Amino acid sequence: MKRFFKKKKKREPSLLEQYDPESFGAIEIQRLFGMLSRKGSGSGFMSIMVTSPLPQEGKSLLVGNLALVAAHAHQRTLILDADMRRPIQHRQFHLSSSPGLSDYLQKTAEFDQIFHNTELENLKLIPCGSHVSSPSALLQLGIPDFKALLDRCQMDFDIVFVDVPPVIPVNDAERIASLVDGVVLVVTSGKTYREIIDRALKLLDRSNCNLLGIVLNNVKGVLPYYYESGYSQYSAGPIWSE
Ligand SMILES: Nc1ncnc2c1ncn2[C@@H]1O[C@H](COP(=O)(O)OP(=O)(O)OP(=O)(O)O)[C@@H](O)[C@H]1O
Ligand SMILES: [Mg+2]
């Protein structure tokens, strides 16, 4: 008799398990991290927000990988998942989504409760937290608390990477941009129109932030001969542009 079993879902390896410091993608991120570090405030602490003009341009993957590179470089590193709309940092590291940022901003979790340990000793995550129906309203009211959270992080961390939603569809990134030391804009090369990038840059400029530079993702699509194929995690790495 034929027996039917429920197909077990294959467990995706965590970002940490996938990380190979010798891979092409990791080398590019190490270069990018070096450039970001040199732009540091000199105070020994740096908070960097990563955003993009549109959804799905590679923000969260870049944040996760930058954080891994920083942690491997012995920096006390924190990922703050401030994308309360499409949060994935907890999934990338196989951790729980709460308690996290939204719980802290709603005052249902204390500062000490929202830090989650990863398998790397010097890499921690503040996940997005419990689902909220209006992240924009929560951020508007919670901006002083968000700032206080970043200020308190200065004691325990050398670098904080803040993952946020894209700039154009929603205004969360604009609200947070002026609170961090620097902003990185990720753009999908060969796909995102110049006018869209200009609009995102204008919105960020209005928010009075410190734009550190633009990272081109997926350059393989536009520079096929420059990049060899066969790299596993990144089909093509990011490229820095100022
Ligand atoms: N350089 C790359 N090479 C291969 N895959 C990539 C690359 N960058 C991003 N991806 C893939 O593209 C998808 C979107 O990436 P990611 O989740 O980082 O984007 P995002 O900008 O954070 O999206 P969202 O706007 O939904 O938050 C993911 O499946 C990710 O693994
Ligand atoms: Mg994302």
Image (cartoon, helix red, strand yellow):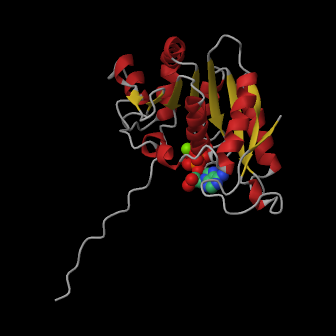
Q: Is 36 on the left or on the right of 198, as rendered? A: left
Above or below, 225 relative to 176 = below
Q: Nearer the viewer, residue 97 or 237?
A: 237
Above or below, 211 relative to 149 = below
Q: Nearer the viewer, residue 60 or 117?
A: 117
Above or below, 6 relative to 59 = below
Quadrant (top left/top right/bottom left/bottom right) for the N terminus = bottom left
Locate residue 101, reporting x and y percent. 43, 28
Q: What is the quadrant of residue 212 in the picture?
A: top right
* Residue beneath the point at 61% across and 32% down: 173
Residue 209 visible (yes or no): no
Looking at the image, how many numbered discs can be counted on the residues? 0
Q: What is the quadrant of residue 230 in the picture?
A: bottom right
Q: Nearer the viewer, residue 39 or 195?
A: 39
* Residue beneath the point at 75% across and 23% down: 38
Q: Is 177 on the left or on the right of 89, as rendered? A: right
Q: Residue at the left extreme?
A: 1
